[in-house]
Protein backbone atom coordinates (compact mmCIF):
# COMPACT_ATOMS: atom_id res chain seq x y z
CA UNK A 1 0.00 0.00 0.00
CA UNK A 2 1.14 3.53 -0.76
CA UNK A 3 0.11 6.96 0.46
CA UNK A 4 -0.54 9.35 -2.43
CA UNK A 5 0.83 12.73 -1.33
CA UNK A 6 0.44 16.07 -3.10
CA UNK A 7 3.39 18.47 -2.97
CA UNK A 8 2.54 22.12 -3.79
CA UNK A 9 4.09 23.35 -7.03
CA UNK A 10 4.98 27.04 -7.19
CA UNK A 11 5.69 29.48 -4.39
CA UNK A 12 5.45 26.87 -1.60
CA UNK A 13 7.49 24.22 -3.42
CA UNK A 14 11.02 25.03 -2.28
CA UNK A 15 10.20 25.65 1.38
CA UNK A 16 8.05 22.50 1.48
CA UNK A 17 10.86 20.35 0.06
CA UNK A 18 13.28 21.93 2.55
CA UNK A 19 11.01 21.16 5.51
CA UNK A 20 10.45 17.58 4.32
CA UNK A 21 14.22 17.15 4.20
CA UNK A 22 14.57 18.39 7.78
CA UNK A 23 11.74 16.04 8.71
CA UNK A 24 13.74 13.13 7.26
CA UNK A 25 12.23 12.80 3.76
CA UNK A 26 14.45 13.58 0.77
CA UNK A 27 12.39 14.76 -2.20
CA UNK A 28 13.99 15.13 -5.63
CA UNK A 29 12.07 17.10 -8.25
CA UNK A 30 12.94 16.93 -11.94
CA UNK A 31 12.23 20.07 -13.96
CA UNK A 32 10.35 17.98 -16.52
CA UNK A 33 8.34 15.74 -14.23
CA UNK A 34 5.30 16.14 -12.02
CA UNK A 35 6.19 13.00 -10.08
CA UNK A 36 9.01 13.70 -7.58
CA UNK A 37 11.03 10.86 -6.14
CA UNK A 38 11.01 10.46 -2.36
CA UNK A 39 13.15 8.17 -0.23
CA UNK A 40 10.14 6.45 1.34
CA UNK A 41 8.74 3.50 -0.57
CA UNK A 42 5.39 3.92 1.19
CA UNK A 43 4.81 7.39 -0.33
CA UNK A 44 3.94 8.28 -3.92
CA UNK A 45 4.39 12.02 -4.48
CA UNK A 46 2.80 14.22 -7.14
CA UNK A 47 3.16 17.94 -7.84
CA UNK A 48 -0.02 20.01 -7.99
CA UNK A 49 -0.52 23.75 -7.86
CA UNK A 50 -1.68 24.86 -4.42
CA UNK A 51 -4.71 26.47 -6.08
CA UNK A 52 -6.04 23.08 -7.22
CA UNK A 53 -4.68 20.76 -4.51
CA UNK A 54 -7.84 20.61 -2.41
CA UNK A 55 -9.96 19.59 -5.41
CA UNK A 56 -7.71 16.62 -6.16
CA UNK A 57 -7.71 15.59 -2.50
CA UNK A 58 -11.49 15.89 -2.29
CA UNK A 59 -11.99 13.76 -5.41
CA UNK A 60 -9.59 11.06 -4.16
CA UNK A 61 -7.02 11.40 -6.93
CA UNK A 62 -4.54 11.81 -4.08
CA UNK A 63 -4.95 10.82 -0.43
CA UNK A 64 -3.54 13.98 1.11
CA UNK A 65 -1.68 17.14 0.27
CA UNK A 66 -0.36 20.49 1.38
CA UNK A 67 -2.09 23.71 0.38
CA UNK A 68 -3.28 27.00 1.79
CA UNK A 69 -6.46 27.55 3.75
CA UNK A 70 -7.28 30.24 1.17
CA UNK A 71 -7.56 27.73 -1.67
CA UNK A 72 -9.64 25.32 0.38
CA UNK A 73 -12.11 28.18 0.93
CA UNK A 74 -11.92 29.30 -2.70
CA UNK A 75 -12.72 25.80 -3.97
CA UNK A 76 -15.22 25.10 -1.16
CA UNK A 77 -13.54 21.70 -0.88
CA UNK A 78 -14.89 19.06 1.48
CA UNK A 79 -11.64 17.75 2.90
CA UNK A 80 -10.30 16.97 6.35
CA UNK A 81 -7.94 19.62 7.70
CA UNK A 82 -5.55 17.46 9.69
CA UNK A 83 -2.94 20.00 10.72
CA UNK A 84 -2.00 23.64 10.41
CA UNK A 85 1.62 24.02 9.30
CA UNK A 86 2.49 27.69 9.66
CA UNK A 87 5.00 28.46 6.95
CA UNK A 88 5.02 30.46 3.74
CA UNK A 89 7.36 31.32 0.87
CA UNK A 90 9.41 33.84 2.83
CA UNK A 91 8.57 33.32 6.48
CA UNK A 92 7.10 31.13 9.19
CA UNK A 93 3.90 33.08 9.60
CA UNK A 94 0.44 33.37 8.02
CA UNK A 95 -0.09 35.25 4.76
CA UNK A 96 -2.86 37.77 4.12
CA UNK A 97 -5.14 38.38 1.16
CA UNK A 98 -5.63 42.13 1.05
CA UNK A 99 -7.60 44.71 -0.86
CA UNK A 100 -5.22 47.22 -2.40
CA UNK A 101 -5.62 50.34 -4.53
CA UNK A 102 -3.18 52.77 -6.17
CA UNK A 103 -1.61 55.30 -3.81
CA UNK A 104 -3.33 58.14 -5.67
CA UNK A 105 -6.78 56.49 -5.68
CA UNK A 106 -9.74 58.26 -4.05
CA UNK A 107 -10.85 54.88 -2.65
CA UNK A 108 -10.32 54.92 1.12
CA UNK A 109 -12.25 51.85 2.30
CA UNK A 110 -14.41 48.92 1.26
CA UNK A 111 -17.56 51.06 1.04
CA UNK A 112 -15.92 53.04 -1.78
CA UNK A 113 -15.70 49.90 -3.94
CA UNK A 114 -19.37 49.97 -4.90
CA UNK A 115 -19.68 49.26 -8.64
CA UNK A 116 -15.89 49.22 -8.99
CA UNK A 117 -13.79 46.61 -10.83
CA UNK A 118 -11.54 44.30 -8.79
CA UNK A 119 -8.99 41.80 -10.12
CA UNK A 120 -7.90 38.73 -8.15
CA UNK A 121 -7.20 35.00 -8.27
CA UNK A 122 -9.30 34.56 -5.13
CA UNK A 123 -12.64 35.35 -6.78
CA UNK A 124 -15.10 33.38 -4.67
CA UNK A 125 -13.64 34.41 -1.31
CA UNK A 126 -13.53 38.05 -2.43
CA UNK A 127 -17.18 37.97 -3.58
CA UNK A 128 -18.19 36.42 -0.26
CA UNK A 129 -16.31 39.12 1.67
CA UNK A 130 -17.95 41.93 -0.31
CA UNK A 131 -21.41 40.36 0.03
CA UNK A 132 -21.04 40.33 3.83
CA UNK A 133 -20.12 44.01 3.65
CA UNK A 134 -23.15 44.75 1.47
CA UNK A 135 -20.99 45.95 -1.42
CA UNK A 136 -21.69 45.10 -5.06
CA UNK A 137 -18.55 45.13 -7.18
CA UNK A 138 -17.38 43.52 -10.40
CA UNK A 139 -14.83 40.87 -9.35
CA UNK A 140 -12.80 39.49 -12.24
CA UNK A 141 -10.38 36.57 -12.29
CA UNK A 142 -6.73 37.54 -12.76
CA UNK A 143 -4.48 35.13 -14.62
CA UNK A 144 -1.37 36.61 -13.04
CA UNK A 145 0.53 39.89 -12.70
CA UNK A 146 -2.32 41.05 -10.49
CA UNK A 147 -0.31 43.89 -8.98
CA UNK A 148 -0.17 45.53 -12.41
CA UNK A 149 -3.90 45.33 -13.10
CA UNK A 150 -4.72 48.75 -11.64
CA UNK A 151 -2.67 50.17 -14.52
CA UNK A 152 -4.89 48.26 -16.93
CA UNK A 153 -8.26 49.67 -15.92
CA UNK A 154 -8.95 47.92 -12.62
CA UNK A 155 -9.94 50.04 -9.61
CA UNK A 156 -8.53 47.63 -7.03
CA UNK A 157 -6.95 44.23 -6.59
CA UNK A 158 -7.05 41.47 -4.01
CA UNK A 159 -3.60 39.93 -3.66
CA UNK A 160 -1.72 37.72 -1.23
CA UNK A 161 1.11 39.24 0.77
CA UNK A 162 3.49 38.31 3.57
CA UNK A 163 5.07 41.69 4.27
CA UNK A 164 3.31 44.16 1.95
CA UNK A 165 6.67 45.16 0.46
CA UNK A 166 5.81 44.12 -3.11
CA UNK A 167 2.54 46.03 -3.03
CA UNK A 168 4.28 49.18 -1.83
CA UNK A 169 6.93 48.76 -4.50
CA UNK A 170 4.16 48.73 -7.10
CA UNK A 171 2.58 51.93 -5.80
CA UNK A 172 -0.30 50.22 -4.03
CA UNK A 173 -1.73 50.70 -0.56
CA UNK A 174 -3.77 48.25 1.48
CA UNK A 175 -7.29 49.29 2.48
CA UNK A 176 -8.53 46.05 4.10
CA UNK A 177 -7.78 42.38 4.74
CA UNK A 178 -9.98 39.77 3.07
CA UNK A 179 -8.64 36.80 5.04
CA UNK A 180 -5.56 35.26 6.59
CA UNK A 181 -4.23 31.94 5.36
CA UNK A 182 -1.92 29.31 6.74
CA UNK A 183 -0.54 26.18 5.12
CA UNK A 184 -2.71 23.14 5.79
CA UNK A 185 -2.12 19.40 5.60
CA UNK A 186 -5.40 18.04 4.26
CA UNK A 187 -6.74 14.55 3.64
CA UNK A 188 -9.41 12.84 1.60
CA UNK A 189 -12.25 11.68 3.85
CA UNK A 190 -12.09 8.06 2.69
CA UNK A 191 -8.28 7.93 2.96
CA UNK A 192 -8.45 9.28 6.52
CA UNK A 193 -10.71 6.37 7.45
CA UNK A 194 -8.04 3.90 6.31
CA UNK A 195 -6.07 3.06 9.46
CA UNK A 196 -2.75 2.48 7.66
CA UNK A 197 -2.97 5.73 5.67
CA UNK A 198 -4.08 7.66 8.75
CA UNK A 199 -1.07 6.44 10.78
CA UNK A 200 1.26 7.29 7.90
CA UNK A 201 -0.15 10.81 7.63
CA UNK A 202 0.10 11.34 11.38
CA UNK A 203 3.76 10.29 11.29
CA UNK A 204 4.54 12.74 8.48
CA UNK A 205 2.75 15.57 10.29
CA UNK A 206 4.59 14.89 13.55
CA UNK A 207 7.94 15.11 11.79
CA UNK A 208 6.97 18.17 9.73
CA UNK A 209 5.81 20.04 12.83
CA UNK A 210 9.10 19.16 14.50
CA UNK A 211 10.99 20.53 11.48
CA UNK A 212 8.98 23.77 11.46
CA UNK A 213 9.55 24.30 15.18
CA UNK A 214 13.26 23.65 14.71
CA UNK A 215 13.40 26.45 12.11
CA UNK A 216 12.78 28.94 14.93
CA UNK A 217 15.18 27.48 17.49
CA UNK A 218 18.85 26.66 17.99
CA UNK A 219 20.84 24.60 20.44
CA UNK A 220 23.43 26.12 22.80
CA UNK A 221 26.24 24.25 24.55
CA UNK A 222 28.78 25.74 26.94
CA UNK A 223 31.16 24.94 29.76
CA UNK A 224 30.50 26.58 33.12
CA UNK A 225 32.36 26.48 36.42
CA UNK A 226 30.49 25.62 39.60
CA UNK A 227 30.98 29.18 40.85
CA UNK A 228 29.22 30.66 37.81
CA UNK A 229 26.55 27.97 37.23
CA UNK A 230 23.69 29.72 39.02
CA UNK A 231 24.33 32.99 37.15
CA UNK A 232 24.37 31.24 33.77
CA UNK A 233 21.22 29.21 34.45
CA UNK A 234 19.38 32.37 35.48
CA UNK A 235 20.03 33.82 32.00
CA UNK A 236 18.95 30.78 29.99
CA UNK A 237 15.34 30.43 28.85
CA UNK A 238 14.64 26.77 28.04
CA UNK A 239 11.83 24.63 26.67
CA UNK A 240 11.96 22.67 29.91
CA UNK A 241 15.18 23.08 31.86
CA UNK A 242 18.78 23.13 30.62
CA UNK A 243 20.67 19.85 30.75
CA UNK A 244 23.59 20.11 33.18
CA UNK A 245 26.26 17.39 33.11
CA UNK A 246 29.48 17.07 35.10
CA UNK A 247 32.74 17.31 33.15
CA UNK A 248 35.87 15.29 33.83
CA UNK A 249 37.46 18.44 35.19
CA UNK A 250 36.32 18.88 38.78
CA UNK A 251 33.83 21.67 39.54
CA UNK A 252 33.03 22.21 35.82
CA UNK A 253 29.77 21.46 33.99
CA UNK A 254 28.48 21.11 30.45
CA UNK A 255 25.23 23.06 29.97
CA UNK A 256 23.05 22.24 26.98
CA UNK A 257 19.76 23.94 26.07
CA UNK A 258 17.40 24.92 23.24
CA UNK A 259 16.31 28.53 22.79
CA UNK A 260 14.55 30.77 20.26
CA UNK A 261 16.96 31.80 17.52
CA UNK A 262 15.83 35.42 17.68
CA UNK A 263 17.19 35.87 21.23
CA UNK A 264 20.62 34.26 20.67
CA UNK A 265 22.39 37.48 19.74
CA UNK A 266 21.24 39.03 23.03
CA UNK A 267 21.96 36.05 25.25
CA UNK A 268 25.44 34.94 24.13
CA UNK A 269 27.23 38.15 25.29
CA UNK A 270 25.42 37.89 28.64
CA UNK A 271 26.43 34.25 29.03
CA UNK A 272 30.04 35.11 28.27
CA UNK A 273 29.97 37.91 30.85
CA UNK A 274 28.44 35.51 33.41
CA UNK A 275 31.40 33.13 33.00
CA UNK A 276 30.30 30.65 30.32
CA UNK A 277 33.15 29.32 28.15
CA UNK A 278 33.38 27.36 24.90
CA UNK A 279 29.91 28.49 23.81
CA UNK A 280 28.68 26.57 20.76
CA UNK A 281 25.52 27.41 18.80
CA UNK A 282 24.21 24.61 16.58
CA UNK A 283 21.24 24.21 14.21
CA UNK A 284 18.39 21.77 14.78
CA UNK A 285 16.58 19.50 12.36
CA UNK A 286 13.55 18.63 14.44
CA UNK A 287 12.11 19.61 17.81
CA UNK A 288 9.43 17.19 19.05
CA UNK A 289 7.58 17.92 22.25
Image (cartoon, grey):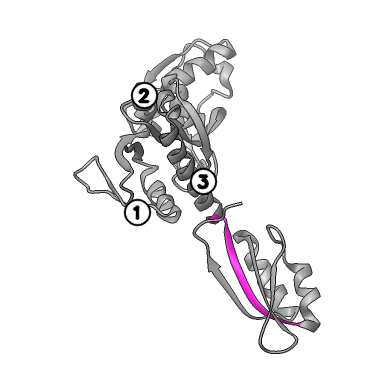
Magenta residues?
A: 214-225
Residue 26 badge: 1
Q: Would you say 67 lies left or right of 278 here?
A: left
Q: Is residue 62 above or below residue 89?
A: above
Is residue 40 within the magenta segment? no
Is residue 219 within the magenta segment? yes
Q: Is residue 55 above or below residue 43?
A: above
Q: Nearer the viewer, residue 162 or 277?
A: 277
Determine the image quadrant of residue 9.
Answer: top left
Circle nearer the viewer, 2 or 1? 1
SS at circle 3: helix
Tell me which numbered mark, 3 or 1, is placed earlier along the sequence: 1
- Cα gap from disc 3 to disc 2, whole angstroms: 24 Å
Residue 238 badge: none
Q: Residue furthest bottom?
A: 249
**Residue bearing the label numbered 3:** 206
Q: Nearer the viewer, residue 9 or 197?
A: 197
Image point (31%, 41%), residue name: 45
Determine the image quadrant of residue 75.
Answer: top left
Residue 156, can we see it? Answer: no
- Cα gap from disc 3 to disc 1, whole angstroms: 16 Å
Q: Nearer the viewer, residue 185 or 98?
A: 185
Q: Is residue 237 above or below residue 34?
A: below
Q: What is the x, y in percent for residue 273? A: 73, 79
Q: What is the x, y in percent for residue 275? A: 73, 81
**Residue bearing the label numbered 2:** 55
SS at circle 1: loop
Amino acid sequence: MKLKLGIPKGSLQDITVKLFKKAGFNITISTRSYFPSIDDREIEATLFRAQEMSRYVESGIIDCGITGRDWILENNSKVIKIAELIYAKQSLRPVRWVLAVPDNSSIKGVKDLKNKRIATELVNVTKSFLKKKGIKSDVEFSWGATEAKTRMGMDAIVEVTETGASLRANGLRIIDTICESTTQFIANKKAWQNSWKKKKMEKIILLLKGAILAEQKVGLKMNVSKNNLSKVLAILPAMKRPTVSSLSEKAWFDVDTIIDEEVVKEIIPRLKKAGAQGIIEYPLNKVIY
